[in-house]
């Protein structure tokens, strides 16, 4: 047992307000580490791989809320559709169509965040702000009844330049503010271990924190 997980979690929770949701990112970490966080009362965990998340869902308590935060292949939506609590990585229209289809199949409304590309790095997935707006508007005229957009998610560039990170977060925050009323957006998912204090300063209400809770991950 390594009780630093519960200490890290308690420390983090003491820093954030009650209106901010903490997603504990448990990717690559064993069930035992998740159960240590669970023992403190924490129930929201984030994973980025379908197979790993599904295996953990099968093995761990059923009151855990599993958030998919990683890039999602269309042909794998069916594996998480029965149980996933929130998909943060809705990054293309074709994926939305499949999530809606699987939601219909499992008679659920699938809660999703639109992932918006705010980072400079090319490899980051996501809609441009313009395309995200086009998609939201299309949904008002052609609704997908088994998919509900709850908000937006973004990842800042991995850099030590805090001005750049702040700029990128402010792009997402202003998209959120401009569109929340018309499209019922409630969740602004931004901030990870390295940048969550900046994200909170800029108005985030959901942070996704892994290594600051569970320790660093092995490269693999
Ligand atoms: C891994 C990951 C995180 C957490 O990263 P840490 O730096 O360990 O906090 C957050 N969001 C996404 C999308 C991730 O893939």
Image (cartoon, grey):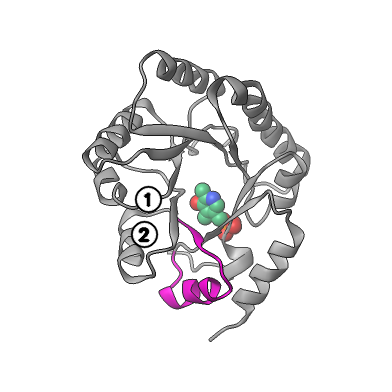
- Distance from mark 1 CB to nearest ligand 1 atom below 8 Å: no
The circle on residue 84 is 1
Instruction: Tell me what residue is drawn at x 35 percent, y 31 percent.
Output: 96
Q: Quadrant of residue 215?
A: bottom right
- Distance from mark 2 CB to nearest ligand 1 atom below 8 Å: no
Indicate whether residue 49 is drawn in magenta: no
Please, which residue is most extreme toward the bottom here? 1
Cα distance in 3D space between marks 2 and 1: 9 Å
Mark earlier in primary sequence (2, 1): 2
Q: Position of residue 76 (x, y in %)?
A: 27, 46
Q: Nearer the viewer, mark 2 or mark 1?
A: 1
Q: Is residue 216 left or right of residue 26?
A: right
- Circles 2 and 1: CB distance less than 8 Å? yes
Indicate whether residue 29 is drawn in magenta: yes
State the extent of the magenta-drawn residues as a range. Answer: 28-47
Q: Which residue is mark 2?
A: 53
Instruction: Tell me what residue is drawn at x 32 percent, y 71 percent.
Output: 59
Q: Quadrant of residue 42?
A: bottom right
Q: Position of residue 190 (x, y in %)?
A: 62, 43
Instruction: Tell me what residue is drawn at x 41 percent, y 19 percent.
Output: 139
Q: Position of residue 48 (x, y in %)?
A: 42, 53
């Amino acid at each position: 047992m390594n009780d630093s997980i519960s200490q890290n979690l308690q420390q983090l929770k003491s820093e954030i307000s009650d209106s901010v949701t903490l997603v504990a990112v448990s990717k690559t970490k064993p069930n035992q580490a998740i159960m240590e966080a669970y023992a403190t009362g924490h129930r929201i965990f984030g994973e980025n791989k379908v197979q790993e998340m599904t295996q953990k869902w099968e093995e761990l308590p059923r009151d855990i809320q599993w958030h998919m935060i990683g890039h999602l292949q269309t042909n794998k939506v069916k594996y998480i559709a029965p149980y996933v609590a929130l998909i943060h990585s809705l990054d293309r229209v074709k994926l939305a169509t499949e999530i809606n289809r699987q939601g219909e199949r499992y008679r659920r409304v699938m809660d999703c965040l639109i992932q918006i590309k705010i980072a400079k790095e090319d490899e980051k997935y996501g809609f441009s702000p313009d395309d995200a707006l086009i998609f939201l508007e299309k949904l008002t005229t052609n609704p997908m009844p088994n998919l509900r957009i709850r908000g937006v998610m973004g990842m800042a560039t991995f850099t030590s330049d805090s001005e750049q990170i702040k700029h990128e977060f402010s792009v997402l925050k202003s998209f959120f503010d401009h569109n929340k009323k018309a499209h019922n957006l409630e969740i602004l998912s931004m901030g990870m271990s390295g940048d969550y204090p900046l994200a909170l300063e800029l108005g985030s209400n959901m942070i996704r924190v892994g290594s600051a809770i569970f320790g660093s991950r092995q490269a693999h």
